[in-house]
Image: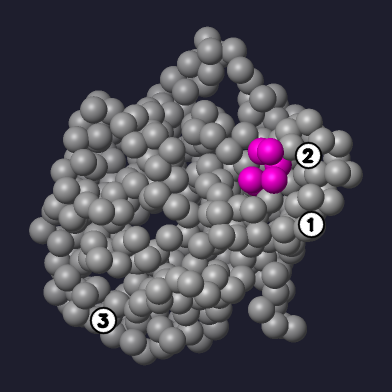
Amino acid sequence: MNEKEIVKWLREDDPDRLTELFRKADAVRRDHVGDAVHLRGLVELSNICRRNCLYCGVRAGHSTVERYRLTADEVMQGARLASEFGYGTLVMQAGEDFGLEGEFVADLIRRIKKEYALAVTLSLGERTEADWRLWREAGADRYLIRFETCNKDLFRVIHPPVGKDDLGFEGRIGALRVLRGLGYEIGSGVMIGIPGQTYADLARDLLMFRELDLDMIGNGPYLAHPETPLGRAAEVLAKNPGAPTDERRRLTAEVGFDYPVSDDPVPADNLTAFKVIALTRLLLPDSNIPSTTAIATNDRLHGRVTGLQSGANVVMPNLTPTRYRALYEIYPNKSATTESPEETHRTAIAQIIEAGRIPGTGPGGRIR
């Protein structure tokens, strides 16, 4: 597919055509990665972040957030649960927290690898190449770092630089290439329906997935956090749907988001997310694609199931200790925030079965 064809599918609203798209993606998924749904146990290691991304509820400038950083024992508790539940992977995710020192993370990886038969995925932001090398040598298997949009101007606005050496979008893509060179499986993804995003932008994102030959691709609808500039911009736009372009830009600039908003915005909804999952599966048939938490948050009953039926083959149950989950509020009302890990596990298994699939075993890496 080229950009024009992808845009046409993203705009498609005929139910019969979309049903055919989802069926085709599901068939490609079955042929290339099978019916197993790989389970990745997620541990949210820290909500401390040095960045000020305009959309994120744990951004450095959000001063009312109660910050935390898990102890090694708390992380190992998550690893133990992942192993007991039969998952093949533990994902350690955090804000860009340099208080998570390289050797501390390396020691966690070594302990996990020694005690459990788990693959380890890291999602710890942009770090030094020395840290990435150390963690790879300690046994880390995969690294996830989302670029959110390949529109460089929009990227620059929503990701304010953290220093003079911040390379912006080019740095993010460069990081993925460095990680691949170090031997990691690499993952990335984008938000769908960011204010300012166009259909052409989203189509180019999909083509960037293919250019990078990503091993893991996680996409979800943009969910506005009300206490962020982009969240306030979304609220302003919702209140002024018919305002001219110049007026919309003036209004959003007043709340901290100074970027032209499309007259024809991409919806931040699950239907568009399912289209993106399906098109991603067609572009990269053997990649691992999750039915994401953002999708489940938008539709707690059916979102994850429909994602699995649209081409996805991964789910990531949250194993963070319950008392911390609400503090990792990148957007409000995340699914499973108040559940115990056991409840989250049972829900994930039930949804996999509802989707007509089977729980996967083993690490579930990409099989080319």
Asked if residue 107 is positioned above or below residue 61 in the image, the reply reads below
Q: For the magenta stretch, what is the residue range?
A: 234-239
Of 358 and 30, nearer the camera is 358
Of 7 and 332, nearer the camera is 332
- What amino acid is labelled 2 in the image? Ser
Residue at the spot x=46%, y=27% of the render?
Answer: 25
Instruction: Name the spot of residue 111 as percent of width and height, x first.
Output: 21, 80
- Label 1 or label 3, whichever lies nearer to me, is 1
Residue at the spot x=49%, y=49% of the render?
Answer: 217
Element on which disc 1 rests? helix
The mark that comes first in sequence, 1 or 3, is 3
Q: How many other residues sit within 10 Å of disc 2, few (<14), some (14-19) or many (≥20)? A: some
Is residue 38 visible in the rendered structure shown here? yes
Q: For the image shown, how many numbered marks are present on the structure? A: 3
Residue 336 on the magenta span: no
**What number is the disc on residue 175?**
none
- What amino acid is labelled 1 in the image? Ala
Quarter where residue 134 is shown: bottom left
**What number is the disc on residue 253?**
1
Element on which disc 3 rests? loop
- Mark 2, residue position: 262
- Mark 3, residue position: 71
Left or right of 151 in this view: 319: left
- Label 2 or label 1, whichever lies nearer to me, is 1
Q: How many other residues sit within 10 Å of disc 3, few (<14), some (14-19) or many (≥20)? A: few
Asked if residue 199 is positioned above or below residue 252 in the image, the reply reads above
